[in-house]
Image (cartoon, rainbow, N blue to C red):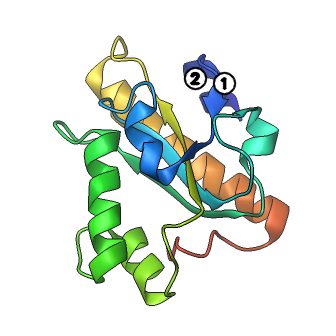
């Protein structure tokens, strides 16, 4: 997990979905994971613990003006309505999952990185996490169709 360790220096915590605005760096771009967990609120986790079998979605945002927070709002709208705007949220809705009990962990990247490197690193970290998840559990998270 070279790229994750290169860019992410802050501790990683799981937050309840309804407390997502408390996540440091939520106005930045980055990578995020969604999981159904119990008793994990604000627990610090290692990279190894982060990729657990309870993860249902790994996503990212790297576009200008589109923060993690705004992407999570798009997920919630799609999850509640089934409308387009977030493929993972739409799949979440199709699977008839509930936002109750959903946890979120985010990896925001520092703004000090140049824009091209930032965008490419975010996309690479998301793919690195998806690849590692597949290696561990022989599948992709249930809300990641591609």
Q: Nearer the viewer, residue 48 or 27?
A: 27
Measure how far apart labels 1 and 2 are at the Cα level.
6 Å
Residue at 73% of width from left, 50% of height from top?
51
Q: Position of residue 125 (x, y in %)?
A: 55, 41
Circle 2 residues within 10 Å: few <14, some 14–19, many ≥20: some
Q: Is residue 35 left or right of residue 107?
A: right
Residue at 63% of width from left, 69% of height from top?
141
Q: Position of residue 93 (x, y in %)?
A: 41, 82
Q: Is residue 114 left or right of residue 105?
A: left
Please tell me whether residue 138 is drawn above or below residue 49 in the rendered image.
Answer: below
Q: Label 2's element? A: loop
> Which numbered circle lies on residue 8?
2
Please tell me whether residue 81 is drawn above or below residue 87 in the rendered image.
Answer: below
Q: Position of residue 132 (x, y in %)?
A: 73, 53
Circle 1/circle 2 CB separation < 8 Å: yes
Q: Is residue 86 left or right of residue 32?
A: left
Residue at 30% of width from left, 73% of height from top?
78
Q: Is residue 7 left or right of residue 25?
A: right
Residue at 74% of width from left, 56% of height from top?
38
Q: Nearer the viewer, residue 65 or 78?
A: 78
Please tell me whether residue 12 is drawn above or below residue 91 in the rendered image.
Answer: above
Q: Label 1's element? A: helix
Q: Say which quadrant the N terminus sits in.
A: top right
Circle 1 residues within 10 Å: few <14, some 14–19, many ≥20: few
Q: Position of residue 115 (x, y in %)?
A: 27, 24
Q: Quadrant of residue 83?
A: bottom left
Q: Which residue is mark 1?
A: 5
Q: Nearer the viewer, residue 42 or 66?
A: 42
> Which numbered circle lies on residue 68?
none
């Amino acid at each position: 997990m070279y790229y994750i360790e290169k860019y992410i220096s802050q501790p990683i915590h799981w937050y309840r979905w309804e407390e997502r605005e408390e996540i440091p760096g939520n106005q930045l771009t980055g990578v995020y994971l969604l999981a159904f967990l119990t008793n994990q609120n604000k627990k610090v986790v290692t990279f190894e613990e982060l990729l657990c079998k309870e993860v249902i979605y790994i996503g990212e945002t790297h576009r200008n003006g589109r923060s993690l927070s705004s992407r999570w709002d798009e997920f919630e709208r799609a999850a509640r309505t089934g409308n387009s705007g977030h493929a993972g949220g739409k799949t979440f809705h199709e699977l008839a999952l509930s936002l109750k009990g959903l946890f979120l962990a985010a990896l925001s990247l520092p703004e000090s990185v140049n824009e091209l490197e930032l965008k490419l690193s975010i996309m690479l970290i998301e793919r690195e996490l998806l690849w590692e998840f597949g290696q561990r559990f022989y599948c992709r998270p249930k809300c990641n169709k591609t």
